[in-house]
Amino acid sequence: MKKNTPQSPTPAKSAPRRSPFAWQNCVLTGVALLLIITGCLLMLPESDVRNTPGGRYAPTPGPGAFDARRIRAAPIPCFLGFVLMIPAILYVPREQKAGEKESQV
């Protein structure tokens, strides 16, 4: 005798999952991230570890604290990286736009 056991429905074959980001988005995001990292590395101080005679860290700013590289040059790539990150995330390739228009018709 066969038992009447409920069987789970077979999953319907669906379209393969697509990433919401195209490869152009990933490349632009990578470039923006490299700009941000470059700016942060430019802001780092030189290897100038000055200690007080007691062995404690001296919190006073060193000679390169107000250097033009750290004050003027380093924020520029950081800012450009953050600004580039916005279109890198929001960019929709033309092929994807055309596919959406055809599916709406």
Image: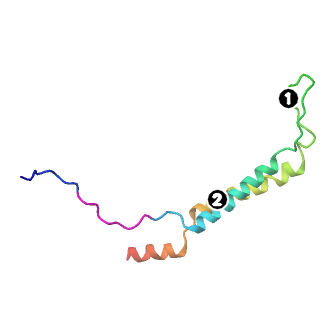
| CA distance separating discs 2 and 1 | 37 Å
Amino acid on which the number 2 mark rests in the picture? Met
Q: Residue at x 57, y 63 (%)?
A: 90
Magenta stretch contains residue 93: no
Amino acid on which the number 1 mark rests in the picture? Tyr
Whether residue 4 sits left or right of residue 80 in the image: it is left
Element type where label 1 sits in the image: loop
Mark 1 nearby-residue class (10 Å; few <14, some 14–19, many ≥20): few
Q: Residue at x 41, y 66 (%)?
A: 16
Q: Residue at x 85, y 44 (%)?
A: 45
Where is residue 41 shown, x and y percent of the image?
Answer: 79, 50
**Quadrant in which the C terminus appears:** bottom left
Mark 2 nearby-residue class (10 Å; few <14, some 14–19, many ≥20): many
State the residue position of label 2. Answer: 85
**Relative to the observer, which residue lies in front, 34 or 69?**
34
Magenta stretch contains residue 16: yes
- Tell me if residue 95 comes above or below residue 23 in the rendering: below
Rendered image quadrant of residue 59: top right
Residue lying furthest front in this view? 1
Q: Residue at x 69, y 62 (%)?
A: 31
Element type where label 2 sits in the image: helix
State the residue position of label 1. Answer: 57
Provide the residue span drawn in magenta: 9-17
What is the basis of the colouring in this image?
rainbow
- Tell me if residue 94 comes above or below residue 19 in the rendering: below
